[in-house]
Amino acid sequence: MLSIKRFLALLLVLPGLVWAGSNEIRFELNDMPGNWFKNTTGPVAGAGSLGVGAPGVRVKFGMDSNTVHTMTSLLYPKGARNMPFDTDAQRGSAEVQLTTPGLYVFVCQVHPFMLGAVIVDDPATEGLDLGDNITLANGITVPTSSDLATRLLRGFLVLTEPGNWQNFASGKPWHINYPNVNVRTDSGVVNLAKVLTARYGNDTSLPKLLTPAQQGVGGSVGQYPV
């Protein structure tokens, strides 16, 4: 069982989303920072670790990596078919079909910073479907409008996109590109960017880089008291 404390997860949704043309999404697990679950079907408005499909979408996982990984469901809509999903650590491939509308996040249990997400979107509903409730890998279920769910959304957005990482050398505030898109949660249709900004802010000031007063390991022996 995965510990929820080990993960930051969830959704990266951007304007201009479309379903996969063949209703198939392919993720390549690789060793590149950020998009470790790379959507090879094609980036979704620049979101390289997110896929969007209609109910019945087939999600296929492959490998382009020098190590082994698992393909494991981290969270999914409550009661979703074919969930939970998990594989052994391998350098192989796997496939799962998603029929229940809502948000799904997959993780590698060996490398818990590796995340990929799929939104199964019902065309009959307004906004992108996150579902009413999500079930986490530790078995708990929470509403999609809850603080835990939106913190996970923010975490996924930061972790999977290098452009959203903190850059202390830039001298600029830390800006997260919250996607300006409407999503459907248990509390109705809301704007994701407005919700995340209201709850967690943005453009956070970062401390300046400092030269350490004490030298680190690596200098000559004569530089350090013994």
Image (cartoon, grey):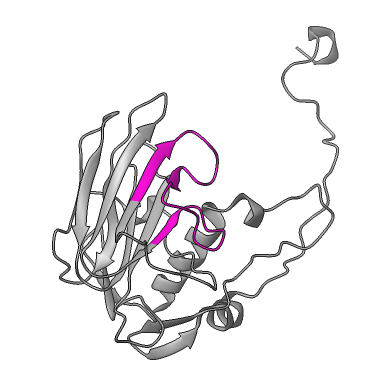
170 w.r.t. 142: above or below: above
177 w.r.t. 131: above or below: above
Percent position of residue 175, x then y: 70, 65
The residue sitting at 48% across, 59% down in the picture is 156
Q: Is residue 28 magenta?
A: yes
Q: Residue furthest bottom?
A: 188
The magenta segment: 26-51
In terms of image quadrants, where is residue 55? bottom left
Q: Provide the major secondary structure of the magenta segment.
A: loop
The residue sitting at 30% across, 43% down in the picture is 61
Q: In the drawing, does residue 163 fall left or right of residue 186? A: right
The residue sitting at 55% across, 73% down in the picture is 15
Q: Is residue 159 magenta?
A: no
Percent position of residue 33, x then y: 55, 40
Q: Residue furthest front?
A: 21
Percent position of residue 133, x then y: 27, 77
Q: How many marks?
A: 0
